[in-house]
Image (tube, rainbow, N blue to C red):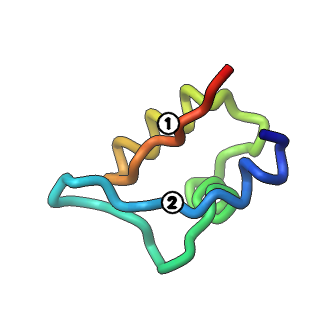
Amino acid sequence: MDFDELMNIELEDDSTPYGGISQAGETLADFLETVEAEKCTNIYKINQWLIECGIKPIKITL
């Protein structure tokens, strides 16, 4: 998966009763802009933020 594909992934709510995406069709790029994070942030850190916000983490294969 290249950088552009990663930034265009649509995020989904997780099963927790709190948080979640801010709008239908929210992408990873949108999320990173909302939390004022740099797009070059480590994917593991991004997944931690997603989980804390009630959003499913991004599954990647290395």
Q: Disc 2 designates what residue?
A: 11
Q: Quadrant of residue 25?
A: bottom right
From the image, which quarter does the C terminus lie in?
Answer: top right
Q: Amino acid at mark 2?
A: Leu
Q: Quadrant of residue 10?
A: bottom right
Q: Secondary structure at mark 2?
A: loop
Q: Nearer the viewer, residue 6 or 23?
A: 6
Q: Residue at x 70, y 33 (%)?
A: 41
Please identify the residue farthest to the bottom as the structure is shown.
24
In the image, residue 37 above or below residue 23: above
Question: Could you classify mark 1 by the number of other residues whose Cα lies within 10 Å: few (under 14), some (14-19), or many (20 or more)?
Answer: some
Can you give x and y, in whole percent of width and height, for residue 42 in the image?
67, 27
Please tell me the numbered disc located at residue 47. Answer: 1
The mark found on residue 55 in the picture is none
Residue 1: where, in percent of width, then height? 78, 39
Foreground residue, 9 or 46?
A: 9
Q: Give the side of residue 30 with respect to residue 47, left or right.
A: right
Density class for disc 2 (Cα within 10 Å; few <14, some 14-19, many ≥20) is many
- Kind of residue at badge 1: Asn
Identify the residue at image location x=64%, y=65%: 30
From this view, report whether residue 57 is shown above or below residue 61: below
Image coordinates for residue 22, horizontal then vertical, percent: 44, 73
Q: Residue at x 66, y 46 (%)?
A: 37
